[in-house]
Image (spheres, coloured by chain):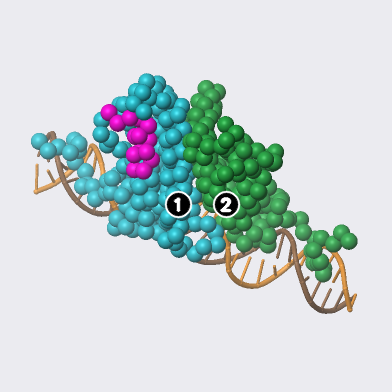
Chain colours: A green, B cyan, C orange, D brown
Amino acid sequence: MSAPGQSRGGRPAVLSREKIIAAALAVIDADGLEALSMRKVGERLGVEAMSLYRHVPNKAAMLAAVVDHLAAQAAVRLPAATAWTDALLDFGHHYRQVLLAHPAAVPLLATHPVSPEVGAQLLGQILATVDLGETSLEDVQLAFQSVAVFTLGHALAQVGTPPGRREAPQQADAGYYDTWFETGLSALHRGFMAAHPTRHG
Amino acid sequence: MSAPGQSRGGRPAVLSREKIIAAALAVIDADGLEALSMRKVGERLGVEAMSLYRHVPNKAAMLAAVVDHLAAQAAVRLPAATAWTDALLDFGHHYRQVLLAHPAAVPLLATHPVSPEVGAQLLGQILATVDLGETSLEDVQLAFQSVAVFTLGHALAQVGTPPGRREAPQQADAGYYDTWFETGLSALHRGFMAAHPTRHG
DNA sequence: GCAGGTTTGTTTAGAGCGTAAGCTTACGTT
DNA sequence: AACGTAAGCTTACGCTCTAAACAAACCTGC
């Protein structure tokens, strides 16, 4: 009972994989992706950089873990039996929220692909929940993946500081990106509906 | 006559901004984005790394120049008076070709936004060429931008090596990504057509 | 011809990075 | 108390970008 992995002695761990992932994300949020270093993550945890290597094989793996951590948040809990075409909209909006919650981490999601396990689990959960109607699983999968890449691409455009501005996230801009996103997402939605008509209208 | 920029003396230039951009792209194509360094670009030009700084303020600016160089290639020369909805398809296909011609550079396009000048010039050229029908300029612009971010997002997914594979660009995969792209692009196309019906059918 | 002036590429050097190797610390067990 | 083991620290190496001072190669005015 309450055996957190059998440990037969040894110095008690101050660090953990989860703490490291959280600290890395915090550094990214605070200082940006380019400023992230193993030394800085260690500093935030009150630890030397080399200590991190007891829990993470290298920097790339740490970043991959951050990616999976964020991707896991993109899981939407949909009401069962939602028409898959409508679920596209819910998924897109939710995924966008997750991305914009960590603007500096968006380029990371773009660069390092989500691990196959997490990706499959995510997609599988959606496909299992949603009402497929008469559409094949493959077609629905392609639709969700299309919404995902559109959403990521759009978020990249939004968070990418256009060189010439001094990092001021204008109020007016937010509105522009919002309507842009809605325009594109609803076009995808309409397009997939037209390709896969249902008898429910 | 034949005065290539008035130069009042000085050591003749072996380097040029253009040569540096080309060399940087060549390094990216050959060794990948992460392996790109000022030293390596210099080496490819038979020059020390510090020499590059006479023509480029720093590494970030050099990468930004590579981005603009690639983005400029995405300019499509469309037959005038093409319906803008059809031009969406041409643009998407052409942009994707440009991206997949330099797979290792795609993450760069994702991370460093295209400069406002190049972006505006690109979009302006399209908007000036295409037949707008009865659709407002703003709506057409949003449609093209949506296709652009979808295409970039999709290319990112394709070139991002899913961790677990050993960089083998499978034959079967290429087909999967092709149909995925066509599915998404045609959904966008249908969606925008439905939102902006024309009397020409 | 030859001394500036000017532009280009090189050298030197410093701060910061990721991380391999070995060491010390702190615990459970014997 | 001694041992085994796991966690964190120290040191060190090679690599990165780039600031600053220097050398080389050209044009122009004398």
Q: Report the residue that reaches farthest toward the front.
A: A199
The residue labelled by disc 1 is B177
Quadrant housing the C terminus of chain B:
top left
Protein chain holding label 1: B
In terms of depth relative to the viewer, which is nearer, A199 or D21? A199
Do callouts 1 and 2 mark residues in contact (Cβ within 8 Å)? no
Mark 2 burial class by Cα count in 10 Å: few <14, some 14-19, many 20+? many
Q: Which mark is residue B61?
A: none
How far from the left and from the top, in percent, is residue B54? 32, 44
Name the residue type under label 1. Tyr
Q: Examine the residues drawn in magenta and state their main secondary structure.
A: helix
Q: Is residue B195 above or below residue C4?
A: above
Q: Is residue A189 above or below residue C14?
A: above
Residue B84 within the segment the image draws in magenta: yes
The residue labelled by disc 2 is A114
x 44%, y 34%: residue: B190
Is residue A168 visible from the viewing direction of this image?
no
x 49%, y 35%: residue: A194
Residue B113 within the segment the image draws in magenta: no
Q: Secondary structure at mark 2?
A: loop
Alpha carbons under labels 1 and 2: distance apart: 16 Å
How far from the left and from the top, in percent, is residue A7? 81, 66
x 53%, y 37%: residue: A197
Which residues lie in the magenta part? B81-94
